[in-house]
Image: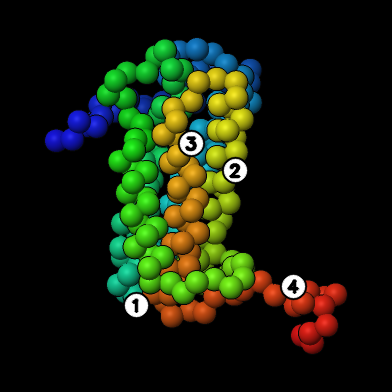
Amino acid sequence: MSDETFNEPRIRLNRIYTRMGDGGETRLAGGQQIPKDDRRIECYGTIDELNAFIGLARVTAEEGSGNCSGLIEMAQTLKRVQHELFNLGSILATLPEDVHPKQPRVTSIEVEKLERGIDFANEQLQALKSFVLPGGSRLEAELHVCRTVCRRAERLLVALAREQSVDEQALRYLNRLSDALFVWSRWVNHQLGVPETLWEPNAAASGTREQ
């Protein structure tokens, strides 16, 4: 097994509401009670939001895989990313002094895996001559939503890193993931045989081109 093997979860969820958060506070993994609008909470809450949107994209990929074998691979990749995002949330929900050596987190292994995925997909794509507008296919548009939420999570983490210690791999991971989501959005359209919608400045109402 890899040296990066993490501890399995040690939780038991038999009650969903506790009333402990009714005053606008919550607890970190180490037991510290902090406001729910703390930057750290905002960071891993946004990563949770990203995970939900990636789950939506994964379902879309799975449902469309009958007509496109490449989407099976994409669904598997997105599922892996969901696990990685939960690992990232785990480390962000813990203050540095409370982190266990085997606590789930993202590492250089996850970053390098994303980079290989970007390179693999990008090799199959034509160079862009304009910016892409989301909407060529449903899955492509959903991956663009994931990309924008990922960028927001990255911005929040940068802000947190100015105030508190943040694992550098967490920042690297979100940066690569947003790049990956962009390339994957193009790749799924390529797999589906759907043309990309490119930005045309003069297609705006003020442009000269007739609509």
Q: Position of residue 44 (x, y in %)?
A: 51, 33
Mark 4 closeness class: few <14, some 14–19, many ≥20 residues within 10 Å:
few
Q: Is residue 104 above or below residue 100?
A: below
* Of the two numbered discs 3 and 2 in the rendering, the one whose residue sits closer to the viewer: 3
**Residue linked to disc 3:** 171
**Upstream in sequence: badge 1 or badge 4:** 1
Q: Nearer the viewer, residue 86 or 198?
A: 198
Identify residue for label 4.
201
Q: Report the quarter where the N terminus lies.
A: top left
Mark 3 nearby-residue class (10 Å; few <14, some 14–19, many ≥20): some
Q: Is residue 142 visible?
A: yes
Q: CA distance from mark 2 to mark 1?
A: 33 Å
Q: Which mark is residue 67?
A: 1
Look at mark 2 in the image and give the residue it sits on: 152
Distance from disc 2 to disc 4, alpha carbons, whole Å, reads 25 Å
| Secondary structure under the numbered disc 2 in the rendered image | helix
What is the CA distance from the residue labelled 3 to the residue labelled 2? Answer: 12 Å
Q: Residue at x 77, y 77 (%)?
A: 202
Residue at 62% from the left image edge and 71% from the top image edge: 130
Q: Nearer the viewer, mark 1 or mark 4?
A: 4
The disc, 1 or 3, on the residue closer to the chain's N-terminal end is: 1
Secondary structure of the residue carrying tag 3 is helix
Q: Is residue 62 visible?
A: no
**Image height of 22 relative to 110, above or below:** above
The amino acid sitting under disc 2 is Arg
Counting residues from the start of the chain, the first of labels 4 and 3 encountered is 3
Q: Is 161 rendered above or below residue 141?
A: above
